[in-house]
Structures are given as C-alpha cells and as structure tokens.
Amino acid sequence: MDGHSAWILLVTLILLLGVVWQGVKGENTIKPDYMTLLVISLVLLVTLAGIGLYGAFVFVEESKAWLHFVEIIVGSAAVGLITLGVNSQLQSRALNLQEQEHLAQFTKQALDDKVVIRKRIAQYFAEVTQSDKLRNGWRNYLKVVELEFNKEKENAKAKQDEINILKERIADLESRSNETFTDESQEPGNTYYKAKTELRRALRAKEEELNGIKEQLIPSKVQKFREDLIEPFADLEGVNLRGRNLRDVDLMGANLEGAMLLNADLNGANLKRANLKEANLFGADLEGAKLYKANLLGANLEVANFQSANLVKANIMGAIIHKTNLDDGILVGANLKATNLYKASLKGANLMGANLEAANLYKAIFEGANLSCVDFKNARFYRTNAMGANFKDANFEGADLEGAMLVKTNLEGAKSLTVDQLCHAGSLFQADMDAELKDMVKKQCPHLFEEPPPE
C-alpha cells in the first residue's frame, strides 16, 4: 500500500469514528441519517483495505495502474462523504435551533399558574419533539406536572366531600319542625338564625376554595367565554357564565357540570338533556326554559326564576331550591328527592307523578298545583301552603304535615294518609278526601275544618 492509499484509509477511519460518535452521542439509538453514513463508510473501509492488500502482495504493473485509478475514485467518494457528514450536522443543528426557538414561544404557557395548561403543553411536546434529548426532558416534566394535577384532583374531591357534609347539615337544620329552629327571627341571638348563618358562611368559603381548585383543573377552552362555544352538546364543564345574556340559546345536551351561572339570563333557553350537575344557578332567569330530562343533581337554584319552565322528567335530586320561582312550571315525572324547597313558589305548577321523597317543603307554596300521584314519602310539609292543590292518589307514607295549610285541597285516593298525620295539619277547611277518613278526622280534630283566620 502506498502513501496515497494510507492517507485515504486514515481519513475514512476518522470519518467512520466521527459518524459513529455523532450517531450515538446522547442518544439511545443511532438515527437513520447517521446509519446511512455509517454503511457508506464501512463499504469504503472494506474496499480500501482490499485494495491495499492486493497492492502489497501483487507486484505487477497492471495492478499499480488499477490501484491508482481506484485511489482517485475512493478519494473522491471520501471527499463527498465528508461533505455529506458536515452537511448533515449543519442541518441537524439548524433543526434543533428552530425547534428551540419554537419551544421558546410556549415558555409562558409551560410556566402558567394553571396546572391543566402546563399538563397539556407537556403532553404535546413529549410526543412531537424531534430531538430525543428535548423530548425526554418534556417527558420528565410531564411526570412532575401530572403528580401536581392528580394532587389538585384529590384536593377538589376532598373539598366537595366537605361541601356535601355542610349541605346535609343545613338541610337537616332547616327541615326540623322544632320551633327553636324554624323561627325566622333575624335577631342575632336566635339559635336557628345563628346556626344557619354560620353553616352557610362555612359553605360559601368551601365553595370558593373548590372553585379556586377547579380553575386549575378545567380545560383552558372553557376558562374564557367564547360565543362559538355556545352550541348543542358543547363541553362547558365549569365555565363561568355569571351574569351572561344567554336568552333563547340552544344548549341541548350540553355539559355544564359545575358551571357558574349566577344571575345569568337563560330565558327561553333550550337545555333539554343538558348536564347541570352541581351548577350554580343562583338568581338565574330561566323563565320558559326547556329542561326536559335535564340533570340538575345537587345544583344551586336558590332565588332562580323557573316560571313556566319545562322540567318534565328532570333530575333535580338534592338541589337547593330556596325561594325559587317555579310558578306554572311543568315538572311531570321530575325527580325532586331530598330537595330543599324552603319558601319555593310552585303556584299552578304541574308535578303529576313527581318524586318528592324526603323533600323539605318548609313554607313552600303549592297553591293550585297539580300534585296527583306524587310520592311524598317522608317529606316535611311544615307550614306548607297548598291551598287548592290536587293531591289525588298521592303517597303520604311517613310524611310530616305539621302546620300544613290544606285548604280546599283534593286528597281523594291519597295513599298511606292517616288520621294522626292530618290532625297535625294547620287547616283542612273545605278539603276533599275519602268519606271514611274525613269522618274520623272530624271526630278527633273538628277545628281543622273551620275557616282559618286571615294571616
């Protein structure tokens, strides 16, 4: 082998080592472009080694001429290989630089206070980043963010459990028929007033804490209200629509779980089959709204206006319905089990076949309402005003009628209604009921059939 061959062989060896080093440096595997260079280098190395051995042992003139020709070809290939390797390195570095510049645009989002935004950014770049080193960095960051996200979810669940306990305590307090707890005096020394005020203050504080945690967990698309999100079957979980004008909007089948809809105007809105679980509708206007089979489980409907709203077969179980206006509402077959209807107004409402088991009806107004076939099992009617209401075929098993005003009501066909229950009522003036039952009540409590004094 002469000097030229040795020189070319040395250059090829150096290039081969450089390619291998660049291909595996900081990576778990050799990349495809480096693999191509490695194969070419190996082919050249084997070729030059064969030529060198041939020139060293075969001392004929023809072989020397052939060796010189091959040296020129292989030398040119070596120069091309070097150029290819350098160009590949430059392109790779340019690509990494562009990728880093692109990532820099998302630095603000990656450091956002809201963990859900950081989680989504990390998930995205952990998959699409081309550089193995950067991609691994994003994957490690994603693990950290997911731990924080899961911790916030656990905190939210714990807060919700605390809120549910407070709601149960408030409902239990307000459903008691003892005068100590049903007196509405606003004097600071009143036992009921003080207990209720403290519990509600604690409840508001916990709800604010929970809303703060939810802000960390709710997807960014619903953090800021956008008109284009208001459409049927929209995912608006936790959205803040406080005070918004949403008259006649079509949100059929939409997910509004945990949404903030305080004082929102939803007059005439289409919310059929919408999910409003644990939504806050305090003071909202839903007059004439369509809520057929809507889910209002545990929702806050306090002081809201549902006049003439369609709530047929709606699930309102466990909802807070304090001083809510449901006049002329259609609640046929609705589930109001364990709801708190304190001072709610349901004048002329149609609740035929509805479920009001264990409901708190303290001072609720059912004047002229259709309550036929309603299940009032274990419900509390303390001071309920049901003048002119139709209770035909309703179930009163275990119901407490203490102080209930049943003036001019229809109680014919009522189930599980006893003399003892009726004798605790406030008035049965001109009430219609089965003749045998009426006679027994008149014997024990004749004063209930006298015209009550004006309030």
Image (cartoon, rainbow, N blue to C red):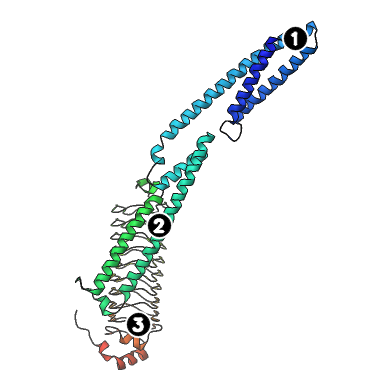
- Spatial CA span between label 1 and label 3: 119 Å
Q: Residue beneath label 3, please?
A: 411
Residue 361 at x, y percent in the picture = 32, 74
Q: Which of marks 3 and 2 is in front?
A: 2
**Could you tell which of marks 3 and 2 lies nearer the N-terminus?**
2
Q: State the mark number for residue 156.
A: 2
Question: What's the residue type where badge 2 is placed?
Answer: Ala
User: Of residues 357 and 136, which is closer to you in this image?
Assistant: 136
The single residue placed furthest to the top in the displayed view is 61
User: Is residue 298 depicted above or below 94 in this figure?
Assistant: below
Residue 375 at x, y percent in the picture = 40, 76
Q: Residues within 10 Å of mark 1 (few under 14, many from 20)?
A: few
Question: What's the residue type where badge 3 is placed?
Answer: Leu
Q: Residue beneath label 1, please?
A: 66
- Spatial CA span between label 1 and label 2: 81 Å
User: Is residue 104 depicted above or below 57 in this figure?
Assistant: below
- Spatial CA span between label 3 and label 2: 46 Å
Q: Can residue 231 be seen in this view?
A: no
Q: What element carries label 1?
A: helix
Q: State the mark number for residue 335.
A: none
- Where does the C terminus fall, quadrant-wise? bottom left
Q: How crowded is mark 2: few (under 14 residues within 10 Å), some or many (20 or more)?
A: many
Residue 138 at x, y percent in the picture = 49, 40
Residue 255 at x, y percent in the picture = 41, 55
Q: What element carries label 3?
A: loop
Question: What's the residue type where badge 1 is placed?
Answer: Trp
**Could you tell which of marks 1 and 2 lies nearer the N-terminus?**
1
- Where does the N terminus fall, quadrant-wise? top right
Q: Which of marks 1 and 3 is in front?
A: 1
